[in-house]
Amino acid sequence: MLSVQNLEVVYHDVVLVLRGVSLDVPDGAIVALLGANGAGKTTLLRALSGLLDVHDGKVTKGQVLLDGTAIERWPAPRIVQAGLSQVLEGRRVFAEFTVEENLRVGGHSHPDGLDAAIGEVYELFPVLKERKDRTAGYLSGGEQQMLAMGRALVARPKLLLLDEPSLGLAPRIVQQIAEIVQEINARGTTVLLVEQNATMALSIAQHGYVMEHGKIVMDKPAAALLDDDDIRDFYLGRGELATSYRDVKHYKRRKRWLS
Amino acid sequence: MTDFVQALVNGLGQGSVYALLALGYVMIYKATKVISFAQPSLMIIGGLFAYHFTRVWELPFWIGLVLAALCGAVLGMVVERLAMRPMVGKPVFTLAIITIGVDIVLRIIANRYIGVQSKIVEYPGGSERLSVGGVSISHQTLGLMVVTALVVVGLLTFFRKSRTGLAMRATALDQETALAQGIKVGTMFALAWAIAGGLAAIAGTFVATQAAGIEQTTWIIALKALPAIIIGGLESINGAVIGGLAVGVVEALTAVYQPDVAPWLGANFALVAPYALMFAVLLVRPYGLFGQKEVERV
């Protein structure tokens, strides 16, 4: 169980990016986190996995509890050790390594049973096994995304953070990624899924959070979010709007939940 | 012909020293993208450790060599921890300048130890030479070549096979992603410095076995490893070795032939030859012979 309580994050000591975020990821669930660009989704993930340091960011308030232990000040390697792994946005495979070497690096924190863990990943992604001696940088985008996910899974995480796994992929591949996420979840890994592709995310998640300007502005079961008029207008897209913009003054057109 | 082969052998011998030093530069550059100008002092101090162990404490040469390498490694780690770690995230240029400062400080300490008498480490077997068909090679040069070969093979295996070696390579490619895999990036930096320090100490020990020993000006030798790494490509282990050997050979051949073939270049042109070679290589291959080609999908 991951529980984030009132988390505040500041970059470069001045830029307040997260302004009191709270969310819960229950064990065994898939939770979706939606939001426009710049809402703070990636920053939240960095705070969870201990990667804020690299970007000169700091947690100034609040707590991140992983199974009841506060981890918001832990260094990244310790968090991975504790069972929380992140797949970074943009895949970030080690381009010059082979597929297999990438997976071995993923198992750095869990050297025991590494070969077995890699075997499981190959079972989940048969295409990686076919390409295991290829240079990772030459794989297709979808294969690289699978490699990035596989690399995180080698560490056998309890909780997997996925940052925009559908980024830049063709619709069919996105569907495939969605199925893989469900499969990973079915095998016992809790998933926190950050997505711009709200339809895909909500179709596989049980619960969804919507972030805007560094705050959680909405929090409902995924099915309810899919039916929500505002969400449909702003994230899912559909032919006509729930309210005609012609009747609204321009400065009111942008929906804000707070302010 | 014998002259040529003899010069080649001498060049390879001296080149081994450059190769060891160049490997040290490459280790640090790969891990942290910083060119460490502290290598000359690490080499000198490594040689002095060996001197102290073998001449003052009278330990056998090979034990002295291993101990010197270990002490060099520890010294490298200390430098990393005290001078480099607090500056993580600062521009690499700043870090490179700091290494110059470290070099000056360490050399001043070393010079206090050296004094006016040059410090010579005795190689077991002394000045015996092995002769094959008119070409002779000293036992000490032979030892140096064997040690260098072992070190290179050891390093290559370490980076290819071991878990830590793989983690170091991953860190060199992308620090944030390496962190996200649970790799302790700081430890990897320290390890890179330790390896560099150890290599410099081995090089220093063999420099100390040469006739001139270690004097206050010996550190200049380590600067010749700079053209070596630029010739080989800053990030390549193979490149460092080949660059180092090439610098040694070119230097030796120039010393033998240039006075007859091109006397108008003046005396001691051999000292400049490595840099001339560096220019020639850079004109043809700007990333060095083994420089990293970016893996890119088109």
Image (cartoon, rainbow, N blue to C red):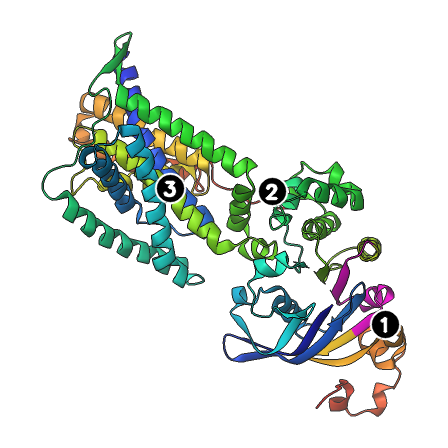
In the image, residue A30 sits, relative to residue B219, either above or below, namely: below
Disc 2 and disc 3 on one polypeptide chain: no
Tell me the chain of label 3. B
Residue A10 appearing in the image: yes
User: Badge 3: few (under 14), some or many (20 or more) residues near its Cα, within 10 Å?
Assistant: many
Instruction: Determine whether, in the image, residue B95 is placed left or right of residue B204.
Output: right
In the image, residue A20 sits, relative to residue B130, either above or below, namely: below
Per the rendering, the mark at residue B282 is none
User: In percent of the image, x 21 and y 49: which residue is there?
Assistant: B107
Q: Amino acid at mark 2?
A: Phe
Q: Amino acid at mark 3?
A: Gly
The residue wearing badge 3 is B24
User: In percent of the image, x 84 and y 72: which residue is there?
Assistant: A236
Residue B126's x, y, as percent?
Answer: 20, 21
* Residue A99 quadrant: top right
Per the rendering, the mark at residue A222 is 1
Residue A227's x, y, as percent?
Answer: 90, 76
Q: Which residues are magenta?
A: A187-208
Residue B216's x, y, as percent?
Answer: 16, 43
Residue A60 magenta-drawn? no
